[in-house]
């Protein structure tokens, strides 16, 4: 263990189960000595997240459904009470209606569009606002995106538009928070089999396209994203903000 994150406290949002990318990030940050604060979305996910986190040496658990302003402000009240300072936030969550992740984008409903934007994009700004007063020593915020935010990827549809907004939010937040020493970056992950990903029609065929065409001829996994998150939370990345780092075996340069 190199302890790159020793003495850092990091908030991880978006663990649902052991396949979640957020769980890969949590494991890698714990390996590097970070103290973790983990959120779960609701009572349904609480027990599974609690059980997973019992394997981590230092992890505190709080509820937070990001569709609720009250739950977001309650989360940061809890954190302020129980922890002195926050150094990092991993925003690893998104949601869209299953029926809108197939077929033509023009069939997106107004409420489906607003729902995807609300959960998947707006929430980053709300979380950054809540985290800011606690990042008194500077900090690093990261979120997860996908190539469908930059290109028209079949079936990704409304989520691609939400990811485009998320990536733009990262640039605006990086500019707002940079003077306070808070960096904001995106990891654009290649496809990984998770519960959310399986909601996108024909997701499995995307995995084989990456194995065939990506320069590294493979797909990435949760640990590949987790190790990049460690880099972004560590002082090694101190000169990087407002960036999109593709962790996708190089697919974005050829696909
Ligand atoms: P996942 O299903 O394991 O995680 C999604 C998380 O979002 C869950 O923990 C869920 O509880 C949370 N969430 C949804 N609505 C919420 C709400 N209202 N409040 C709080 N939390 C809420 O899937 P994942 O693939 O690990 O997704 C994590 C992130 O990675 C998402 O932003 C996703 O778009 C992104 N991503 C995934 C892939 C992939 O192929 N799996 C690729 C690139 C980016």
Image: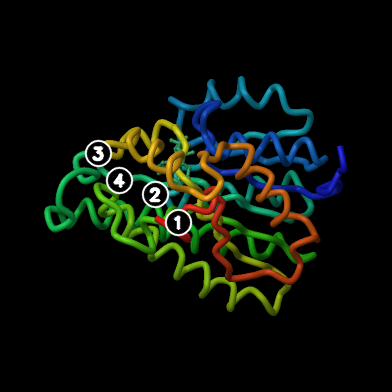
Write down the residue under mark 1: 123
Circles 3 and 2, Cβ within 8 Å, touching? The answer is no
Say what secondary structure mark 3 lies in: helix
* Left or right for 113, reference 7: left
Residue 98 is labelled as 3
State how far apart marks 3 and 1 are (Cα): 20 Å
Say what secondary structure mark 2 lies in: loop
State how far apart marks 1 and 4 are (Cα): 14 Å
- Name which of mark 2 and mark 1 comes first in the sequence: 2
**Crowd around label 3: few <14 · some 14–19 · many ≥20 (10 Å):** few
Circles 3 and 4, Cβ within 8 Å, touching? The answer is yes
Circles 2 and 4, Cβ within 8 Å, touching? The answer is no
Classify 178 as above or below 53: below
**Crowd around label 2: few <14 · some 14–19 · many ≥20 (10 Å):** some
**Crowd around label 4: few <14 · some 14–19 · many ≥20 (10 Å):** many
- Name which of mark 3 and mark 1 comes first in the sequence: 3
- Name which of mark 2 and mark 4 comes first in the sequence: 2
Residue displayed at 54% across by 21% down: 47
State how far apart marks 2 and 1 are (Cα): 7 Å
**Does label 1 point to a residue whose CB lies under 8 Å from ligand 1?**
yes
- Name which of mark 3 and mark 2 comes first in the sequence: 2
Measured from the top left, where is residue 128 in percent x and y?
57, 62
Circles 2 and 1, Cβ within 8 Å, touching? The answer is yes
In this view, the residue in front, 111 or 31, is 31
Write down the residue under mark 4: 96
Write down the residue under mark 2: 67
Dot in front, 3 or 2: 3
């Amino acid at each position: 263990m190199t302890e790159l994150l020793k003495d850092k406290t990091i908030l991880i949002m978006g663990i649902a189960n052991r396949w979640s990318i957020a769980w890969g990030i949590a494991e890698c940050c714990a390996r590097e000595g970070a103290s973790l604060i983990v959120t779960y979305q609701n009572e349904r996910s609480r027990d599974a997240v609690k059980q997973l986190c019992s394997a981590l040496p230092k992890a505190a658990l709080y509820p937070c459904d990001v569709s609720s302003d009250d739950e977001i402000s309650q989360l940061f009240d809890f954190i302020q009470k129980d922890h002195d300072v926050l150094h990092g936030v991993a925003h690893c969550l998104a949601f869209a209606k299953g029926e809108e992740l197939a077929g033509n984008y023009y069939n997106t409903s107004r409420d489906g569009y607003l729902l995807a934007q609300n959960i998947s994009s707006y929430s980053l700004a709300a979380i950054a606002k809540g985290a800011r007063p606690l990042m008194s020593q500077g900090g690093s915020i990261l979120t997860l995106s996908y190539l469908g935010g930059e290109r028209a990827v079949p079936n990704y549809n409304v989520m691609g538009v939400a990811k485009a907004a998320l990536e733009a939010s990262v640039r605006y937040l990086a500019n707002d928070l940079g003077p306070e020493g808070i960096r904001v970056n995106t990891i654009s992950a290649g496809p990984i089999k998770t519960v959310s990903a399986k909601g996108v029609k024909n997701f499995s065929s995307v995995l084989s396209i990456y194995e065939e065409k990506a320069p590294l001829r493979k797909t990435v996994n949760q640990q590949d994203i987790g190790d990049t998150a460690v880099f972004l939370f560590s002082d090694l990345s101190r000169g990087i903000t407002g960036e999109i780092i593709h962790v996708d075996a190089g697919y974005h340069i050829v696909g």
